[in-house]
Image (cartoon, rainbow, N blue to C red):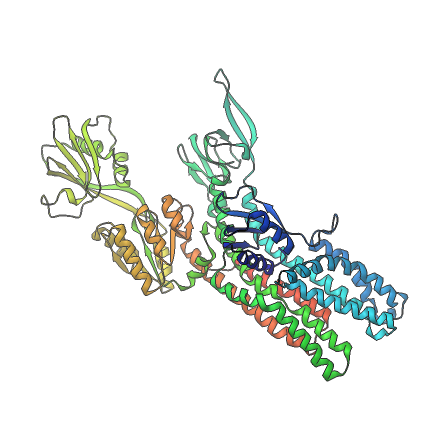
Amino acid sequence: MDCPTCALTINKYLEKEGMENVKVNFATGDVSFELKGQKNESALSKGLNGLGYTVVEDQEAHPHSHDHALEHDHGRQGGWLKTNMQRFWFCLPFTLVLMLHMIPALQHSWLMQPWIQFSITLPVLAVGMSYFGVSAIKSIRNRMPNMNVLVTIGALAAFIYSLYGTLTGQHDYIFYETAATVITLVFLGNYMEEHTVSSTQAQLKKLAQTQVVMANMIAYDQEHNENIFSVESNALRTGDLILIKSGEQVPADCKILWGDASVNEAIITGESVPVKKQSKDKLIGGSIMVDGTVKAQVTAVGSDTVMAGIISLVNEAQGEKPPVQQMADKISAVFVPLVIGIAFLTFIINWLILQDFTPALMRAIAVLVIACPCAMGLATPAAIAVGLGRGARNGVLFRNATSLENFKDIRQVVFDKTGTLTTGNFTIDGFQILDPGISEEVFKNIVYSLEKYSNHPIAKSITRSWKTTNEIRWKKIAEEKGKGMLATDKEGIEYGAGSYGIAVGQTTSDQHNIYITRNQQLIGTIDLKDELRPEAKTVINYFHSKNIKTILLSGDRFSKAKQIADELGIDEVIAEKTPEEKLQIIGKKNAQVPTAMVGDGINDAPALAKATIGISMSDASQIAMQTAQVVLTNHGLKNLPLAMGLGRHTYKTIKENLFWAFSYNIVAIPVAAIGLLTPMFGALIMAFSDVVLALNSGRLMVKKVV
């Protein structure tokens, strides 16, 4: 697609044909929609071909949606005039020759003869019309006039008027260089615009290119001898064994079976400090093995890998339109007919006032070529592409562009406790044995034997610390939701390990994490400590500096939650809440002011979906990641300020871009209409209006946002 107006044209066409959920991504050329009504895919392809686009099937399309990539096909003349850059270089020498009359000494040379100028202009006009003209005709035929209509009318008007002057011998009427300059400079402008959009995509392409590397595959022959041979990473399948050596790139998502290593995961996290990895740890495809050698088993390939997920998330988000762009789209849709109307009025009024056809026509042509609907279309996609690209490079993934924009309104942030503000890794802080007849060894053995059967993070941390080989063999054991582990041994003695619920009536102290009972009698308690994430305090301070309220919402006991809130300086504590209550609380908070929620557990998923912006950690449960609009990769709580800063600054950049695009057109069109700009300068300024937007958007990549 040449410019965002193309994306708008395709969007309008598909919606007109009854398609739903249409997303056109100008940056990548991808189109997705839900097929509805009578039309089938081949009929829609034919319609899009009629608009001037070639549909390229996407092999990895989801079976229930329809994903395609588009290429513009107007102007595919022969071999090398395929890109706007090539067309510009082809037209430039002819145009420069036509401009020689500006040098006084050459004003009367043979090059200035009308018929010679006519023949020099023809190649430029041919290339211009086979590109702009074909596109203009197709867009008019489909009642969706695009920017190329303005360029075509402007160039043709100058050329036909000059031809009339040549045929009638009126040398004052000859402006061949205007026709050639307009075409040449618009090719240059289109190239610059393409280049700026593709450079924002370069970041993603860099990520995508890491997908295919050589891998050392391990295979065994009949004698069980190990053989290692090289294969391309895209030939790997889930379950394959691979060897990764120091300095190599990890070829696919995998799990270490043997060996220790230091791994640079900057490609995902933006952090270049190597991370220590050992047996059973996961490696992300695309990360670099700084030191060490490992044998690993491939866990995901192709579109299932972490990297593919990131790329598709960012691509999808780029195709989304935030609310601010919808206004610009509405104006873009009527812009071309409006400009043609203004150009016609300019011509008539100037002709009546000046009583001279030539300057009146030049002013009308200047209006046509200086108007830039592309600037309005490019304002949002350029900023969003850069914002999303920077986010992805630093471990912040936005699921859609709307969440990027919504950050500007957030007035309070709700945090889950376990796994979000804390690491989720518990350590035993202390324990108490209340029955003097039980030794420490027996007590630890009872606890280990019970907790071994639970999947709860607390239970796992205890079994890690108190592992024993002398465990009790239970006759019956079960986990009761909300209570804990209950078991009966071979002698019929009942044991329990769980929350305060199993010890009610035995003690009034509800401050402990785990209570141990034997035949319903309390025999001991255990206290645990959950480590705070080292970056939690900095993140909370950041929100306070921005006057954003912080709230801790936890299912844990109030005293525990309060202790953490006090340590971090959190404004409000809401504790001892079930997932259903969490959902209602977020609903209420959201109704008061826009609220972001940060969580990572299965029980957080409904609340994350309900918040203005749901933010999840990438090591969260799958369901929390699916319902969140923003995902922070690799324990990325530290990236939360960056996510908010990027959201706010991207929105600010979009506003600046739209202000420039509108004010440019509002100022430039009247200036051209009163004759202060020639068509040549008009075309040059139009080309640079897009460059200004691109440069402003590019600042997002480096500017301080936190």
- Say which quarter of the image contains residue 51: bottom right
- Residue drawn at the location 41% of the way across and 34% of the way down: 278
Q: Is residue 582 visible?
A: yes
- Say which quarter of the image contains residue 142: bottom right
- Residue drawn at the location 63% of the way across and 64% of the way down: 145
Q: Is residue 675 visible?
A: no
Q: Is residue 67 left or right of residue 136?
A: left
- Residue 59 placed where, x, y %? 56, 41
Quarter of the picture containing the C terminus is bottom left
- Between residue 117 and residue 695, name the one nearer to us: 117
Quarter of the picture containing the N terminus is bottom right
- Residue drawn at the location 40% of the way across and 64% of the way down: 409
- Residue 517 placed where, x, y %? 13, 37
- Say which quarter of the image contains residue 542: bottom left
- Residue drawn at the location 21% of the way across and 27% of the way down: 471
- Between residue 702 and residue 491, name the one nearer to us: 491
- Residue 313 placed where, x, y %? 48, 49
- Residue 168 placed where, x, y %? 87, 73
